[in-house]
Structures are given as C-alpha cells and as structure tokens.
Image (cartoon, rainbow, N blue to C red):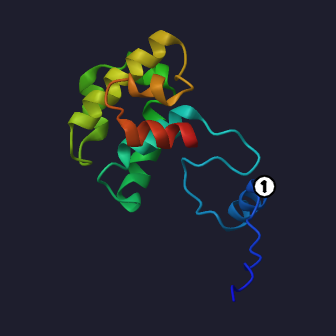
C-alpha cells in the first residue's frame, strides 16, 4: 500500500518577502522594506564583502560612501584616493577593480541590469554578478 502524499504548501514569494521584511538583518547597504535597492551600494558591499567579514566591512562601507557617495564620484577619484580609502581591507586588487569598474559604469551611465552585462565589468565574476542582479 502506498501512503498518500503529504500536503505541503510552498510559501509564495510574497510570503517570503513579508517574512524577510520582519526578520531581515539590518545592514547599511540593504534597502529598507518598500525601497528599491541602490545598485551602487549593493555592488560596493558585494565587492567589500569578498573574503572579508561583515563586522570589518561596516565601518569601511560608511567611510567609503562619505568619500565617494556615487559611482561617478568614485570613477572621478584618483587611484591613490581609492587605494587610501581601501587601506586595511586587504586584497587590494579588489580596490583597483572597483575603481576600473566604477569608471566603466560611469562611462556607460548606469549599472547593467543583467547578469551577463555585470559579468563584463572589471572585477565582477559569476557569483558577484548573480548576487548584484538578485538584489
């Protein structure tokens, strides 16, 4: 005799979003519920968080945004200023790629809105492109 299949209802996307809004981890780069995420903040946080803890990134993220509030400001900055703001986070190739990527985005006028477009930018691989596109 075969047992009847258990009735498991899967949560709807809307239910998951409501749960997330209630229980989300508050981080400075995450948009508030009901607010569209800022691609610059999402991208910046994803690059900073590569091989670096959230606790270490938080103060750098805040200082970086004070110094470079937009992708255009970051793109226009001298490389020495970017490297100086990054000092202490390690993996300095991330900072060089961040600067090159900012220049490419500023030149294009906006961040690409597809994973494929994001992957064409300096320093953005498959995982980071997927994370940025998903958020």
Q: Which element is circle 1 on?
A: helix
Residue 125 at x, y = what percent? 35, 35
In the rendered view, tell whether residue 77 sits above or below residue 39. Answer: above
- Please tell me how crowded label 1 is: few (under 14), some (14-19), or many (20+) other residues with Cα within 10 Å: few
The C terminus appears in which quarter of the rendering? top right
Q: Residue furthest front?
A: 1
Give whichever of 131, 84 is nearer the camera. 131
Give whichever of 64, 97 is nearer the camera. 97
Q: How many marks?
A: 1
Judge whether residue 63 can be spotted in this image: no
What residue is shown at x 56% (from left), y 42% (from top)?
A: 134
Q: Would residue 110 appear left or right of 126 to someone viewing this image? A: right
Q: Residue furthest top?
A: 107
Q: Residue furthest bottom?
A: 1
What residue is shown at x 41% (from left), y 40% (from top)?
A: 128
**Splitting the image into 4 quarters, where does residue 119 fall?**
top left
Q: Which residue is mark 1?
A: 14
**Splitting the image into 4 quarters, where does residue 20 fall?**
bottom right
The N terminus appears in which quarter of the rendering? bottom right
Residue 12 at x, y = what percent? 77, 58
In the rendered view, tell whether residue 104 sits above or below residue 71. Answer: above
Judge whether residue 110 can be spotted in this image: yes
Q: Would residue 125 appear left or right of 27 to someone viewing this image? A: left
Give whichever of 55, 23 is nearer the camera. 23
Q: Would residue 102 appear left or right of 52 to someone viewing this image? A: right
What residue is shown at x 28% (from left), y 34% (from top)?
A: 95
In the rendered view, tell whether residue 86 sits above or below residue 75. Answer: below
Residue 72 at x, y = what percent? 48, 19
Residue 98 at x, y = what percent? 34, 30
């Amino acid at each position: 005799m075969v047992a009847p299949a258990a009735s498991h209802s899967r949560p709807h996307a809307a239910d998951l979003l409501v749960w997330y809004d209630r229980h989300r981890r508050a981080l400075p780069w995450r948009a508030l519920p009901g607010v569209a995420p800022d691609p610059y903040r999402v991208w910046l946080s994803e690059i900073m968080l590569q091989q670096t803890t959230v606790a270490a990134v938080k103060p750098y993220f805040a200082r970086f945004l004070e110094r470079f509030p937009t992708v255009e400001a970051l793109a226009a900055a001298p490389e020495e200023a970017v490297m100086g703001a990054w000092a202490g986070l390690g993996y300095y190739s991330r900072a060089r790629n961040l600067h090159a990527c900012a220049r490419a985005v500023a030149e294009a006028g906006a961040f690409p809105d597809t994973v494929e477009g994001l992957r064409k930018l300096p320093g953005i691989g498959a995982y980071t492109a997927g994370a940025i596109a998903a958020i």
